[in-house]
Image (cartoon, rainbow, N blue to C red):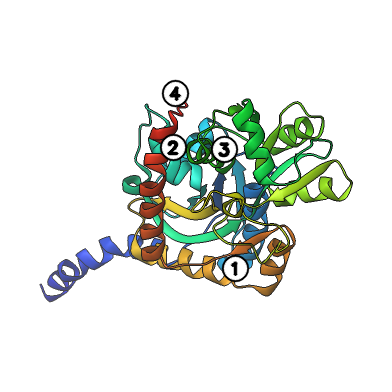
């Protein structure tokens, strides 16, 4: 009788043991990091470098998987629908996390409600770039030209930082430049160099090498202040648009509902990777700053960015669906 009572008393603990063990052993298989943009772009490169640093910390491979389309929405939704077990995470961007909810009318998820923040990852330096043969020597001259007749501006896709920087320029300068979206940064740079489009706000990592060969001219940065990574470039604000600020960023997110112990493991691994001097140096070479944050700081940041861009998108009339 005593033995039966002992077994009955311990039964709940035995039934709960597999779940406790599963969390305690996380990860026991590879973790997938989803990127909503094509291979070779700035977000993809940052993801792959970070995955390399996270792998030895987690003791399992971290596999970068590109699920592209709809300004990052395809990748974001894939993670939203994934099992909340920590094995699928998203390296999201300003587009998918803060801009698309206002740009797309048919989104089936809410990034703030359906994704759990882990850490901000990077601040990506963009530059205002033009073909080297264009006559404009600075942003003020480009703005003056666009007031005389609309120019064309390229982006690597609707909803991205390049698109919204161009729309912000339209709103603040009172011009009507025409958006030309591309499927990624590589074809954008090609057409920019040949003059098929007039200008672009595009990552410095892709534009600077072409500027060094004399094919592009970099005339400004869209950030609120000059960048420590390229301090020689003036801001767009200095060209007569005070308050102009488009700072591109990325952040690591998980599906909502991942158990707290697993989230803590992901948070620790992410912070360790982002503070690794080798990773910091590699990203700085590509004009990317690492900016690890707490989940709470990231949640507040995403909300602030969403609140900032919603009225600008509405004022510009920009839509993607």
Residue at (50, 55) in percent of width and height: 251
User: Closer to the camera: disc 4 or disc 1?
Assistant: 4
Is residue 182 at least partly visible in the picture? no
* Quadrant for the C terminus in the image: top left
Check disc 3: other Cα within 10 Å, few if <14, some if 14-19, many if 20+. Answer: many
**Where is mark 2, residue-wise?**
100
Q: Classify mark 2: helix, strand or loop.
A: helix
Give the spatial CA distance, label 1 vs label 2: 28 Å
- Residue 202: name its quadrant: top right
User: Closer to the camera: disc 1 or disc 2?
Assistant: 2
**Where is mark 4, residue-wise?**
321
Q: Earlier in the sequence, mark 4 or mark 1?
A: 1
**Where is mark 1, residue-wise?**
273
Residue 113 shown left or right of residue 90 in the figure: left
Dot 3 and dot 1 residues touching (CB under 8 Å): no
Q: Is residue 250 above or below residue 318?
A: below
Give the spatial CA distance, label 4 vs label 1: 37 Å
Q: Classify mark 1: helix, strand or loop.
A: helix
Q: Earlier in the sequence, mark 3 or mark 1?
A: 3
**Where is mark 3, residue-wise?**
166
Q: Earlier in the sequence, mark 1 or mark 2?
A: 2
């Amino acid at each position: 009788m005593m033995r039966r009572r002992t077994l009955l008393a311990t039964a709940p603990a035995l039934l709960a043991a597999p779940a406790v063990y599963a969390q305690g052993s996380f990860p026991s298989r590879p973790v997938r990091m989803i990127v909503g943009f094509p291979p070779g772009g700035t977000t993809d490169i940052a993801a792959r470098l970070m995955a390399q640093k996270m792998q030895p910390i987690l003791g399992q491979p971290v596999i970068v998987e590109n699920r592209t389309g709809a300004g990052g929405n395809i990748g974001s939704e894939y993670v939203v629908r994934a099992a909340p077990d920590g094995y699928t995470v998203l390296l999201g961007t300003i587009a998918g996390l803060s801009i698309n909810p206002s740009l797309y009318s048919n989104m089936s998820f809410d990034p703030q409600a359906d994704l759990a923040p882990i850490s901000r990852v990077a601040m990506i330096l963009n530059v205002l770039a033009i073909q080297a043969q264009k006559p404009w020597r600075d942003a003020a001259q480009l703005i003056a030209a666009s007031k005389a007749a609309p120019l064309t501006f390229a982006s690597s896709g609707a909803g991205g930082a390049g698109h919204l920087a161009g729309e912000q320029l339209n709103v603040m300068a009172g011009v009507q430049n025409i958006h030309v979206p591309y499927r990624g940064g590589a074809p954008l740079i090609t057409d920019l160099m040949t003059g098929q489009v007039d200008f672009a706000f595009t990552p410095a990592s892709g534009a600077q090498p072409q500027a060094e060969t004399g094919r592009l001219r970099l005339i400004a940065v869209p950030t609120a202040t000059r960048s420590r990574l390229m301090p020689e470039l003036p801001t767009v604000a200095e060209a007569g648009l005070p308050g102009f600020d488009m700072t591109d960023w990325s952040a690591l997110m998980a599906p909502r509902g991942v158990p707290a112990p697993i989230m803590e493991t992901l948070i620790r691994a992410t912070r360790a990777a982002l503070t690794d001097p080798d990773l910091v140096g590699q990203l700085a070479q590509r004009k990317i700053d690492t900016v690890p944050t707490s989940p709470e700081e990231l949640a507040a940041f995403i909300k602030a960015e969403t609140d900032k861009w919603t009225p600008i998108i509405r004022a510009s009339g920009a839509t993607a669906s």
